[in-house]
Amino acid sequence: GIQVEQSPPDLILQEGANSTLRCNFSDSVNNLQWFHQNPWGQLINLFYIPSGTKQNGRLSATTVATERYSLLYISSSQTTDSGVYFCAVEASGSGTYKYIFGTGTRLKVLA
Amino acid sequence: KAGVTQTPRYLIKTRGQQVTLSCSPISGHRSVSWYQQTPGQGLQFLFEYFSETQRNKGNFPGRFSGRQFSNSRSEMNVSTLELGDSALYLCASSLEYTDTQYFGPGTRLTVL
């Protein structure tokens, strides 16, 4: 089945710093989403981005489907950005599972 | 529009018991998916329902089952609970079969 790898696994930043999170996937995908999981376990939808580039405030994401990776950019990080960031993909083809999640990037932003 | 709701939020059971979790999707959404999250295995797909039909199923034993009602609300059931079933169970809904997924707050199940 499709493999989803995220890097780095852990990241510590000072408030105001920028960061780039990466998601690599091993096969073609129909869909890709980025999520932020807060300390209470709630998964918050950041981007639905099977291809192209999107921006939402300080966050932006780019997916290059032909090269099988996606990037999440966080600019001017704030302490509220702390948590775990997941990418999830839905593989192409019939009979496939719904979203396969990566192992996540745990981000801690220090004041 | 109200988000995805899950009940109960917390649950404690003992080994051998069974449990039923409920998920109410966002109004108008027809697809509901269930996931299990554990520290060791991460987030794993359980199954998906669309218009009351199971469309996809993950690699879980038959003790895990689910259903979807005509109003799109979904339940999942775990029979003969094991200690390893302790996890956060997350439900997600989407408007169509292939679409953005929105997650509920989860049900944290502890099996003693």
Image (cartoon, coloured by chain):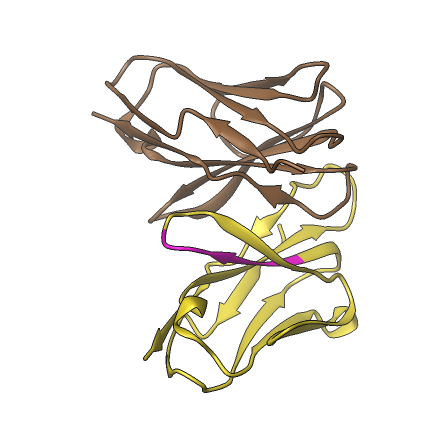
Q: Is residue B86 magenta?
A: no
Quadrant in the rendering for residue B85: top left
Q: Colour of chain A?
A: yellow
Q: Which residues are magenta?
A: A33-39
Residue in view at x 54 percent, y 31 percent: B5
* Residue B63 visible in the current orientation: no
* Residue A54 visible in the current orientation: yes
Nearest the camera: A103 or A59?
A59
Seen as rendered, the residue at the extreme front is B1
Q: Position of residue A64 (x, y in %)?
A: 74, 73
In the image, residue B32 above or below residue B41: above
In the figure, the brown chain has which letter?
Answer: B
Residue in view at x 53 percent, y 38 percent: B104
Left or right: B5 with respect to B29? Answer: left
Give the position of the C terminus of chain B as an image quadrant: top left
Quadrant in the rendering for residue B2: top right
In the image, residue A65 above or below residue B58: below
